[in-house]
Amino acid sequence: MSVLTVLEQRDGKWNRMSFEALAAARKLAGALSVPAQAVVLGSGVQALAEEAATYGVEKVLLVDEPLLAHYTPDGYTAALEQLIRAQQPKVVIFPHTYQVRDYAPKLATRFGKALVSDVVDVKAETGDISFVRQLFQGKLNADVRVAGDPQFASIQAGAFRAAEPGGEKAQVEDFAVQLDQAKIRSKPEEPFREAQRSVDLGAADIIVSVGRGIKEKDNMPVVEALAQALGAELAASRPICDNGWLPMERQVGSSGQTVSPKMYLAVGISGAIQHLVGMKGSHTVVAINKDENAPIFETADYAVVGDLFEIVPALVEELKKVKA
Ligand SMILES: Cc1cc2nc3c(=O)[nH]c(=O)nc-3n(C[C@H](O)[C@H](O)[C@H](O)COP(=O)(O)OP(=O)(O)OC[C@H]3O[C@@H](n4cnc5c(N)ncnc54)[C@H](O)[C@@H]3O)c2cc1C
């Protein structure tokens, strides 16, 4: 009986959502009083498994197998099916990545189950597990319960703050799988690579993010001045990038980047769910919006209700005074 997290890596590099999923798994394992475990799949990934063992889990299972050197849905499904049948976890938690969307429903089906996808919270009151999913663009939350074990769920990007390493190092245990090359039907090709990004918003400490409240391109210097005064990176909601007022690589959200800076300053952004998933892992969120009912205020630590064209220049002036 455990809560097992499937950590995702590609070419020896973690997908950072793995540790958000692990945070969810640890919460659930704590509530159920069962161990949290993790599995690392790939070829030549011993070092990653050792690293994962420092993230507050009871045990890391290592599936190191040449046929898993590159991701294939058949290979991953077969390997994880064998592992889950042998280990019998109560719950299997995944990060809700593109890769997981590809193979995890098929894996769950092997156990006669559905994958509860894009989960934003996990609960285990009185021992009954609920997976919280958002409906109608985040206007409603549904508690989803699954009959029987194992249960399968994937965690939405940004829903949990990533687990941090620290504490005692757990044991790493090899788990051997039997894979048949002939049953792996897809042949991986060179992965698609996006054009080199000139900005890594994921590494920024402070982000000033601008939304449609800025109204037109000619007003962009208003927020540029704020970003400059704070030493922040400039980012935006999707309409701003769709309009070409900022490059696409500065878009935050479900179809843009996922960020978790120390401070995220949302200026004239309503807080649509597709935007929130990209920034709600931020440590402190400050929102400036003239609509006191804007959904962004539900995520914000500091809510400034007012006209950005009055507030932002005044803020820049104050920042300049402090620096002078
Ligand atoms: C499949 C899909 C993927 C998507 N992916 C993304 C994504 O990755 N990222 C993303 O951001 N969106 C994404 N969207 C779009 C998303 O649904 C919203 O439409 C978008 O986030 C809204 O952007 P916004 O908040 O800037 O604009 P709006 O929703 O128009 O909000 C503008 C806000 O500005 C405020 N405002 C107006 N004037 C002022 C003023 N003078 N002072 C202060 N406040 C003011 C208003 O009160 C309002 O709250 C996606 C949508 C779909 C369907």
Image (cartoon, rainbow, N blue to C red):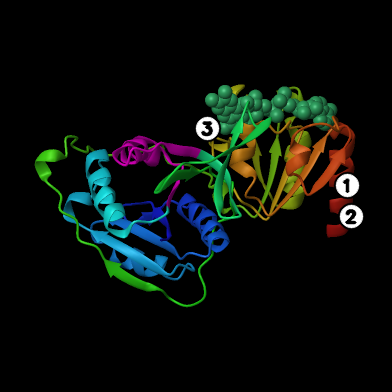
Note whether 143 is above or below 163 in the view shown: above
Assign a secondary structure to mark 3: loop
Q: Quadrant of residue 30?
A: bottom right
Query: Decide: marks 3, 1 in contact (CB < 8 A)?
Result: no
Q: Quadrant of ligand 1?
A: top right
Q: Is residue 155 visible?
A: yes
Q: Residue 290: x, y in percent? A: 86, 31
Q: Residue 247: where, in percent of width, then height?
A: 56, 32
Q: Residue at x 88, y 47 (%)?
A: 317
Q: Nearer the viewer, mark 3 or mark 1?
A: 3
Q: Determine which of the numbered discs, if any, sits on residue 317 in the image.
A: 1
Question: How many discs mark residues in the rendered view?
Answer: 3
Amino acid bearing label 2: Lys
- In terms of secondary structure, where does tag 1 sit? helix
Q: Please tell me which residue lies in front, 312 or 104.
A: 104
| Magenta range | 91-117
| Residue 99 to residue 171: above or below | above
Residue type highlighted by circle 1: Glu
Asked if labels 2 and 1 touch by Cβ distance under 8 angstroms, the answer is yes
The quarter of the displayed image where residue 226 is located: top right
- Ligand 1 closer than 8 Å to label 3 CB: yes
Residue 166 place in picture, x, y as percent: 52, 73
* Residue 178 falls left or right of residue 286: left
Give left or right: position of 40 versus 271.
Answer: left
Position of 193 with respect to 142 (left or right) is left
Mark 3 sits on what residue? 255
Density class for disc 2 (Cα within 10 Å; few <14, some 14-19, many ≥20) is few
